[in-house]
Image (spheres, rainbow, N blue to C red):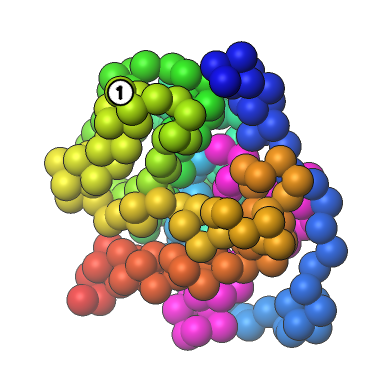
């Protein structure tokens, strides 16, 4: 199975085209105030929405769902397909420095490519720790959207990889979604044919499963406890 890892890593960098849900296309986006807080979605292809139609990826769908629910916010997509935690760590400062508005909250969604490439979990943890430390230094709250290792990586790998996200969330006092793909994993109707990425309907399921946690983290981050 290890020989499948390079192929899966390439797959993780791509998403297939899906048609937008009719109800999503028909609904008008609510107005967002100019001074609305900003959430930065900093992650890999699961945030980037690569090869999904414009507006179908997680950040724009999350923004739409939050605003429709009365949480006025802008969600900036800083996802890069294929990113490992090491690659993301190197671009974090540049990404933050070039935001027009300082984010009120940063969503950190990384680690899947590390796992699929079989990179040492210790490196993944160190890189995520450095990312969260930089956010701490800039006084920007974070929410981690966690990842789980595929069982075929072996028990030792799984036992080293899976605890990374809850441990770092606790260490850095960050909010946590334990497993980002929980709402879609194993459901072929919600996944692309690579069985790794959600399709457009799957993205909406993930948004529905995570938006309350994001809204709660944003509320605390902006002082509206």
What residue is at 28 percent from the left and 27 percent from the top?
160
Q: Is residue 158 left or right of residue 201?
A: left
Please name whichever residue, 182 or 14, is drawn nearer the observer in this view of the structure: 182
Q: Residues within 10 Å of mark 1 (few under 14, many from 20)?
A: few
Tell me the quarter of the picture where residue 216 sits: bottom left
Image: magenta residue range: 44-73
Q: Is residue 205 above or below residue 26?
A: above
Is residue 76 visible in the rendered structure shown here? no
In reply to whether residue 56 is colored magenta, the answer given is: yes
What residue is at 27 percent from the left and 56 percent from the top?
175
Q: Which residue is mark 1?
A: 156
Q: Is residue 20 left or right of residue 141?
A: right
In reply to whether residue 55 is colored magenta, the answer given is: yes
Percent coordinates x, y for residue 179 in the rendering: 40, 51
Percent coordinates x, y for residue 16 in the rendering: 79, 46
Q: Is residue 17 above or below residue 168?
A: below
What residue is at 16 percent from the left and 47 percent from the top?
170
What residue is at 58 percent from the left and 68 percent from the top?
205
């Amino acid at each position: 199975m290890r020989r499948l890892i390079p192929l899966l890593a390439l797959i993780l960098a791509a998403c297939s085209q899906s048609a937008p849900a009719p109800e999503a296309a028909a609904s008008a986006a609510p107005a967002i105030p100019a001074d609305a807080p900003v959430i930065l979605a900093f992650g890999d292809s699961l945030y980037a929405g690569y090869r999904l139609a414009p507006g179908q990826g997680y950040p724009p769908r999350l923004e739409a769902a939050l605003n429709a629910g009365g949480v006025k916010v802008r969600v900036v997509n800083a996802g890069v397909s294929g990113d490992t935690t090491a690659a993301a760590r190197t671009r974090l400062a540049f990404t933050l420095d070039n935001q027009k508005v300082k984010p009120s909250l940063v969503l950190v969604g990384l680690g899947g490519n590390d796992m699929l490439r079989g990179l040492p979990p210790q490196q993944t943890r160190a890189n995520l720790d450095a990312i969260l430390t930089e956010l701490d230094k800039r006084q920007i709250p974070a929410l981690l959207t966690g990842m789980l290792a595929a069982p075929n990586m072996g028990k030792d790998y799984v036992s080293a990889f899976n605890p990374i996200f809850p441990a770092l969330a606790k260490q850095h006092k960050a909010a946590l979604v334990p497993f980002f793909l929980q709402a879609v994993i194993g459901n072929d109707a919600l996944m692309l044919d690579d069985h790794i990425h959600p399709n457009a309907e799957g993205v909406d399921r993930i948004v529905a499963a995570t938006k309350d946690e994001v809204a709660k983290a944003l509320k605390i981050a902006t002082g509206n406890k």
